[in-house]
Each structure stands twice: as C-alpha cells, then as structure tokens.
Amino acid sequence: EGLDVTYDGRVYTVRLQGDANAPPAEVLLPPDLPVEGKAFQQLAALAALKHPGGGTVKRVRATPDFHPGDSGVAIGSVVHTEGLVVPAAVGTDINCGMRLHVADLPVETFLARRDAFVERMKGHYFFGTRDVALGSRAVEALLRDGLPGWLLETMEAPLGMVAKADLGQLDRESARVYLGGALEGDPAWAPTGLRREGVVRDPGLATIGGGNHFVEVQRVEAVVDRARAWEWGVREGQLAFMIHSGSRDMGRHVGLTWLERTRAAWPVGAPFPESGILPLAEPEQVREYLRAEATAANYAFLNRLLLAELLRLTLRELFGDVEAPLVYDVPHNITLPWEGGWLARKGACPAEAEQPVIIPGSMGAASYLMVGLGNAEALASASHGAGRARSRFSMARGGADKREEALGLTGVDCISLRAERRIEEAPAAYKPIGPVVASQVEAGIVREVARMAPLMTFKA
Ligand code: 5GP
Ligand code: MN
Ligand code: MN
C-alpha cells in the first residue's frame, strides 16, 4: 500500500513509492514473525522525513520486536539524523528503560515468604507506604547532572527512604548505569511539583507507571556465557529483579511540550508531512530540546534506582542482610550523539560492544541478558523486548479466547490493582521471544549471556 518492499529472508527494505531520494528503511525480521503493515508505513514515513530548513535522515533501522506506535513512530525504530532531531522518535516516556539486579537468595527461601513480600511491595509501589523525600538541592543536582549529582547531595544530607548504608553501594553501581546515569540537563525543565525549597515529596517518583511497565522477580535459569556472567555477578539459580519504567510525569511534561513546540516551529507555508511526524532543525531549538530530554532522562534514572531501593529495603526486612547488586540499567527511549549527528531509539536497546543488553519476554516467558557486539549495520541496537503482537484493546475487549490457557496465563503470578491488566498484558499479547532473540544472535547483534524465568510480576 504505497510502499516498495523487498525481503531477503532476513531483512525487509521499505521505501515510500515515488520517493527515490529517501533512504530506505530496514527491518530485521525472521519470516515467522507477523507484523502489521502499519508499522512498515510508519517506518518508511520516518525515513522520508525532511525539514525545509535542512538536515537529513541518514538511516532508519528497526528491531524484530517492531510494531506500530500510537504517535506515528513505530516502536523498535532507530533513526540516525544529521542537522535535525525528531522528538516523536523518542516520545513522551523519555528514558523508559530496563534495570536488572540479582541476589544470592535461594528461590525456596524467597517463595516461602511470598505473601509477606507481595504485601510490602504492593504497599510501596501501589499505596505509597514509603517516604521518597528528596532535598531540593538533590533534586536540582539530579536534573542538572544525573545520578552522580544527586548522590553527592544526598550523601551530604541523607533524607527519606535511601538507607545510609546503601550510599556507598549506589556510588559504586553508577558505573553500571548506561552513561553513568549522568546526562547534561537543565533544572528549569522541572515541572512545578518538583520546584520547592527544602524537602520535596514527589508522589510519582518510585512508582512503576501503567501499561506494560513492570517490576518482575525472576530466577536465573540458565547461564550460557559463564565468563561474562561471572564478571557481571550473575549465576544460575540466583533471584533476579527486572525493572521496566521511565520518566513518569516528568517525561510526559517535556515530551508533550516539545511535540507542541516542534509543530509551532514548522516553517509557515511549508506543507505538513502526511505522517504527522515533524522534525526540529533550528540549531538553538535542537540544543534546547536535547537539554530538556536529558533532564527527563536523569529523572528516569533515579526513578528506576528508587524502585530498586524499595526492593532492597524489603528483601532486608524479610531475609536479613541480602545484597542485591545492580547488573545494568539501560534506556530504550532516548536521543544520543552518533557519528556527527544523533541517534534516536524508540523502543530499542543500545547494543554496543561489550555492553549488557536486557531483553524481556513477557510475564509468562523467559527474559534475556545479552552482550552487545556493536554491530554498525544494526546501528548498535537490539530489540528491547519481544514486542506486542496484539493491541491492549483487542486483548481486553476483542472476541479473543479468554481462557487462561489460551492467554498463556497458566502459572503466572501477576500482582496488579486492576484485574483487566492481567489480560491486557497476558503472554499471548506478545510475540514469541525465542525467534526475536535468535534472529539477533544470527545477525551478529548480540550474544546470549543468561536467561531468566518469571516468578512474579508487579504491574500497576
Ligand atoms: P515497551 O513498553 O518498552 O515498548 O515494551 C517492553 C517489552 O517488555 C515488551 O516488548 C515485552 O516483550 C516486554 N514485557 C512486557 N510485559 C512484560 C512482563 O510482564 N514481563 C516481562 N518479563 N516482559 C514484559
Ligand atoms: Mn515506557
Ligand atoms: Mn519501555
């Protein structure tokens, strides 16, 4: 439908018909993974983007978990630009990402206290039974400099839920956060709730967020690359904690503001692209947008860190002195400098050489810890999950088979306040993770390090 498409059994190449100047968009996709045509349309439109004031889209590539996005940009898109940026290619959940911890706690010991654990975590995540007080100076330092700034201020004036004993550990762990969790932001982008003198209590901080965001307890069921797993502190039989969350209201505020500004900045008289996706090209505005994005990204790094602190706190309460060290924390919605221009990932995990890559499956399937190979053809990016196969709406309202078995929910322990969440987010809503991962191993993008099986999943 208006697209030129070729497929070599591994990679699709798509282009808007009659637009020979646009770079082709590529999608790594094994033949047995179905994808809605709309996602290909969105990808081709992204590749064809132009700004009357200049700048170019150099390359567009999508990962095998690719599917249509609500905002016009397909989830799983990676776009390399020069002289322009595309705020919609990151969207409003800036620095949505994955964080993985492991703990040397036998699964039987943990499960023996399942109910107590669930009660406490429900309180923390859903009912606000914790105090996430921050000093205003720590907030400012976080937004400006990221985790290291926040940590420094917090060390001087410890406040709220972060245990003093954890501060040293948090300091060591910042090396295991992508880019150190330190982007160059601007506190002026703080929404009003964060602008307060003295003690700041942000009710959105350390909350998971809705939709498919989650905190999952898993068991490390297989280690494939023993040397690397050892180096990263991962061993078979360990408990793992996977956190999927983003920048909450902070990212929404920044994201929506810039979608609007980008529209307002579109040159008068120039026709709007049919796709509705607009780039930003004026250098001062590009700089300002990237600053704003970085500010929200810094907030998301702290959000995931605090979600993990609540887990650690609860583990210590129930099981004594258990450590739960960080394996890695990595964003999958972000714009970063790339070969003289920028690379925007929307639902794609950086897969740079030697770096950990986290690929979740679903609450009923395995999740993977991989290592990146820095594959330039794939723009050093891997899938950030299995990818949605069926919309939330079609899961909950459609004529779909609602039996537990058909939904893949047998044996799934999903903790949520909304009963429908279990169905909207059922394993059957996602693509099979096996071929998604295998195709990326085959293409030389990632290698497997370890595989985890879900034990329980918290979804708001
Ligand atoms: P996103 O919301 O960032 O686009 O998607 C994240 C990915 O997480 C999805 O593609 C899916 O594979 C995975 N995912 C969604 N829900 C769950 C869950 O409850 N548990 C696990 N392990 N993975 C999930
Ligand atoms: Mn998100
Ligand atoms: Mn996400």
Image (spheres, rainbow, N blue to C red):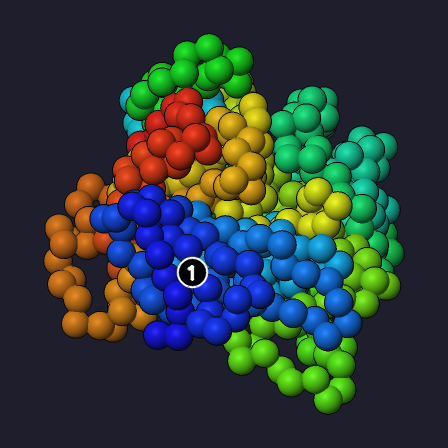
Which of these two is toward me, 135 or 362?
A: 362
In the picture, measured across the screen, residue 305 lies left or right of residue 40, that is right
Relative to residue 380, is residue 70 depicted above or below? below
Which of these two is toward me, 85 or 413?
A: 85
Residue found at x 76% / y 77%: 265
Residue found at x 76% / y 86%: 268
Residue 263 lies, in percent from the top left, at 69, 78
Which residue has dot 1 on it? 14
Which of these two is toward me, 445 or 159?
A: 445
Q: What residue type is labelled 1?
A: Val
Which of these two is toward me, 38 or 421?
A: 38
For the N terminus, give its image quadrant: bottom left
Residue found at x 53% / y 13%: 231
Please indicate, yes or no, whether residue 306 appears anywhere in the rendered image.
no
Residue found at x 14% / y 54%: 406
Residue 397 lies, in percent from the top left, at 25, 73
Relative to residue 312, is residue 398 depicted above or below? below
In the picture, measured across the screen, residue 133 lies left or right of residue 331, that is right
Q: Residue placed farthest to the bottom in the image?
A: 269
Mark 1, ligand 1, within 8 Å: the answer is no
In the picture, measured across the screen, residue 299 lies left or right of residue 123, that is right
Q: In which quarter of the image is residue 446?
A: top left
Please indicate, yes or no, whether residue 58 appears anywhere in the rendered image.
yes
Mark 1 lies on a secondary structure that is: strand
For the C terminus, give its image quadrant: bottom left
